[in-house]
Amino acid sequence: MDLKIRSKNFAHQYVKLALDLPTNKLGKHVEGQLIRCSTSVAANYRAACLAQTKKGFVSKLSIVIEESDECIFWIEFLKDEELVRGSELDKVLNEARELTAIFISSRITASKNL
């Protein structure tokens, strides 16, 4: 699947998960963080694809990696706090890990080709 589509689908999954969090103070905080970092993955990946130079691509991809890793953090945090239970967390966590690994691999390849 095209990474633009996959990263956008990823953002949609995270937003839906975020909107289903409890409405207490912690739930609202994590909701905002999840929405911000997951949509940033998709938006910045699109920006990376439009980079005018290889250096620009590597730079934007670095942002994508930071944001996808932050998504992993927040899902692990939700699990630790037991705010959400079930296999849905494992699915989104696995997707975040896979995407992060893909983006890291892409950055390594692009950096070698500079």
Image (cartoon, rainbow, N blue to C red):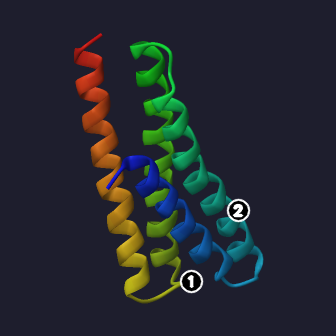
Could you tell whether 103 is left or right of 38 in the image?
left
Question: Which residue is painted at 47% across and 62% down in the image?
Answer: 10
Seen from the viewer's position, the closer of residues 44 and 24 is 44
Check contact, mark 1 vs mark 2: CB within 8 A: no
* Rendered view: 23 above or below 66: below
Q: Which residue is mark 1?
A: 83
Query: Which quarter shows the N terminus?
Result: bottom left
Could you tell whether 51 is left or right of 27 in the image?
left
**Mark 1 or 2: the one toward you:** 2
Could you tell whether 4 is left or right of 39 in the image?
left
Asked which secondary structure carries label 2, the reply is: helix
Q: Residues within 10 Å of mark 1 (few under 14, many from 20)?
A: some
* Rendered view: 85 above or below 54: below
Query: Which quarter shows the C terminus?
Result: top left
Residue 68 rendering spot, x and y as whole percentages: 45, 50
Question: Which residue is painted at 52% across and 47% down in the image?
Answer: 41
Q: Quadrant of residue 53?
A: top left
Could you tell whether 59 is left or right of 16 in the image?
left
Q: Amino acid at mark 2?
A: Gly
Q: Which mark is residue 26?
A: none
Residue 38 rendering spot, x and y as whole percentages: 55, 56
Residue 82 rendering spot, x and y as whole percentages: 51, 84
Q: Quadrant of residue 107?
A: top left
* Rendered view: 87 above or below 91: below
Task: Report the Cα–Cα distance between label 1 and label 2.
Answer: 15 Å
Asked which secondary structure carries label 1, the reply is: loop
Question: Which residue is painted at 36% across and 76% down in the image?
Answer: 90
Q: Which residue is mark 2?
A: 32
Q: Residues within 10 Å of mark 2 (few under 14, many from 20)?
A: few
Q: Amino acid at mark 1?
A: Leu
Seen from the viewer's position, the closer of residues 43 and 26 is 43
